[in-house]
Amino acid sequence: AQKVTQAQTEISVVEKEDVTLDCVYETRDTTYYLFWYKQPPSGELVFLIRRNSFDEQNEISGRYSWNFQKSTSSFNFTITASQVVDSAVYFCALRNNFGNEKLTFGTGTRLTIIP
Amino acid sequence: SQTIHQWPATLVQPVGSPLSLECTVEGTSNPNLYWYRQAAGRGLQLLFYSVGIGQISSEVPQNLSASRPQDRQFILSSKKLLLSDSGFYLCAWSAFISSGSGHEQYFGPGTRLTVT
């Protein structure tokens, strides 16, 4: 069975601080995909990144960066120089390589950026 | 570009009343379609998914049902709502893109359902 754990339920940081959101996953598959989504107060989930299990290169996109480590089954997300607009609930998700493409979501981390 | 629509945006219904939520996708063909529910302060629970017209898979037993009458239309229904059906309902689509950059799911704006 697949499982995604986001142990941090809520995080608050002061604006311009860096913050890392943790994601630990469990799967028996050798091929899988990991995702991060952002859910702002409006409710719609916004896709941020997809990473496949064969690509352990870290990725940076502006103030966002992702650290994928298969050895520890983790896919952590760091926001550098946080801004108030980063306040949202962030979900990590896992999908296996089967055809139905079902996503297993973590329970989310609520991030609050204090101005 | 692809877009996904959901309506209504909000809904207040009494216990025992029927439900019909609609989701449509534009700009793509033969998408996989999904219905999720998010209870207040909780994660996302997959309810149904569909890989084609008339093909529905249910993930959890409940008093809800789903139908896909057209390629890009996905409907969530109930004959009699329960209090526990309250929540935020999200529709999503995914499609494989030949460049290999597909598989992620894209979500609609959601419907906030309150059962009173």
Image: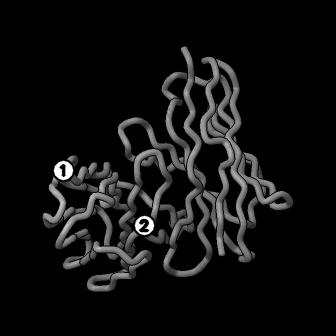
Q: Residue at x 57, y 80 (%)?
A: A98
- Hey, which residue is sitting farthest top in the picture? A115
Q: Where is residue A87 in the image (x, y as percent from the top left)?
A: 51, 30
Q: In which quarter of the image is the C terminus of chain A?
A: top right
State the SS at label 2: strand
Q: Which residue is drawn at 39% across and 81% down?
A: B57
Determine which residue is flagged by label 2.
B94
Mark 2 or 1 closer to N-term?
Answer: 1
Query: In the rendered image, is residue A57 in sight?
Result: yes
Considering depth in this image, is B70 or B43 the residue closer to the camera? B43
Q: How crowded is mark 2: few (under 14 residues within 10 Å), some or many (20 or more)?
A: some
Q: Residues within 10 Å of mark 1 (few under 14, many from 20)?
A: some
- From the image, state whether disc 2 or disc 1 is nearer to you: 1
Q: Which amino acid does label 1 sit on?
A: Leu
Q: Residue at x 50, y 53 (%)?
A: B43
Q: Where is residue A7 in the image (x, y as percent from the top left)?
A: 68, 47
In the figure, is residue A76 to the left or right of B33? Answer: right
Q: Position of residue A37 (x, y in %)?
A: 52, 49
Q: Position of residue B8 (x, y in %)?
A: 18, 52
Q: Tell me if residue B9 comes above or below residue A73 in the rendering.
A: above
Q: Tell me if residue A18 comes above or below residue A74 in the rendering.
A: above
Determine which residue is flagged by label 1.
B11
What is the chain letter for disc 2? B
State the SS at label 1: strand
In the figure, is residue A50 to the left or right of B75? Answer: right
In the figure, is residue B38 to the left or right of B110? Answer: right
Labels 2 and 1 within one chain: yes
What is the chain letter for disc 1? B
